[in-house]
Image: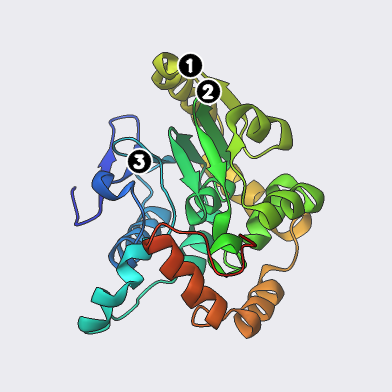
């Protein structure tokens, strides 16, 4: 099934593959993609014919984060698009899906794209993949992905990479727990097949129970964190406006000491 921004295919082995399909934009997400992802994740969660959900990207990158170009001056000329699912909604749906999830990463997983990776149970990446949480460089803190990222890589590592916005190479991502396996690009499909086969050996209802228990006992209270984030997140702050403008204009932001 092909939608506007994603495609969903279910194999005879009951593996659903969601492919982010905006390759010309590096699979950066806009509101349409978030809404389509949210709808499909809800449907797959309730589909007993699906055992595993795989998330991957078409083209050069996995997902390069939010499509900042859609927030430019030209976007102000368009009528506002009603939002069905926010990024936080989609991350929560992916994180709480009652069946195993696998992120298959090549190219960049940036910002919210890295957030998608942290919400999957298993993350596989090619040796040339890279990650970053660069929101701080455009005047915003990565509040939406913060609880999931801290849980995945730990408080100390998140402070380094969240504060700097620097690129995280695949080897470093493996070392800090952002991914579970690295492989040569030529071996990516074989690695995915091996891991899905292992996951298919797990009993479906026990899998759902294990994920629910892990979320309850091993994670911070995400509802409390989301409420805190909502109270502080201001995407229209002067810093955010300057950061987005500097990104569009391919220049250093005003706070960078020339």
Q: Secondary structure at mark 2?
A: loop
Q: Which residue is mark 3?
A: 57
The disc at residue 214 is none
Q: Which residue is mark 2?
A: 127
Left or right: 27, with 213 as reference point = left
Please tell me which residue is depicted at 41% across the width and 47% down the height of the picture.
Answer: 63
Give the x, y percent position of residue 211.
63, 50
Residue wearing tag 1: 184
Residue 182 vs residue 191, the one in the foreground: 182
Question: Reading the chain from its start, which is encountered first: label 1 or label 3?
Answer: 3
Residue 121 figure quarter = top right
* Picture quadrant where residue 120 is located: top right
Residue sitting at the far front = 258
* Quarter of the rendering occupied by the C terminus: bottom right
Mark 2 neighbour density, 10 Å: few (under 14) some (14–19) many (20 or more): some
Q: CA distance from mark 1 to mark 2?
A: 6 Å
In the rendered image, residue 28, in percent from the top left (x then y), is placed at 36, 54
Q: CA distance from mark 1 to mark 3?
A: 17 Å
């Amino acid at each position: 099934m092909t939608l506007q921004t994603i495609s969903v295919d279910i194999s005879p082995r009951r593996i659903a593959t969601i492919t982010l399909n905006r390759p010309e934009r590096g699979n950066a997400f806009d509101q349409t993609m978030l809404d389509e992802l949210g709808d499909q994740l809800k449907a797959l969660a309730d589909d007993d014919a699906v055992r595993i959900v795989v998330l991957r990207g078409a083209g050069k990158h996995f997902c390069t984060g939010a499509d900042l170009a859609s927030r430019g001056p030209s976007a102000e000329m368009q009528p506002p698009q009603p939002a069905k699912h926010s990024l936080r909604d989609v991350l929560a749906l992916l994180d709480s899906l009652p069946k195993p999830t696998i992120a298959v990463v090549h190219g960049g997983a940036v910002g919210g794209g890295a957030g998608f990776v942290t919400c999957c149970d298993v993350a596989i990446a090619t040796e040339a993949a890279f990650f970053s949480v660069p929101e701080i460089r455009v005047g915003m803190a990565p509040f939406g992905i913060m609880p999931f990222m801290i849980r995945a890589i730990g408080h100390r590592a998140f402070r380094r990479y969240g504060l700097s916005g620097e690129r995280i190479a695949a080897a470093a991502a493996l070392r800090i727990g952002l991914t579970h396996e690295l492989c040569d690009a030529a071996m990516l499909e074989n690695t995915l097949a091996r891991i899905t086969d292992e996951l298919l050996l797990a009993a479906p209802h026990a899998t759902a129970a294990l994920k629910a228990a892990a979320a309850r006992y091993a994670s911070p209270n995400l509802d409390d964190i989301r409420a805190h984030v909502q109270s502080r997140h201001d995407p229209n702050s002067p810093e955010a406006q300057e950061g987005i403008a500097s990104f569009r204009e391919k220049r250093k932001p005003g706070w960078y000491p020339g």
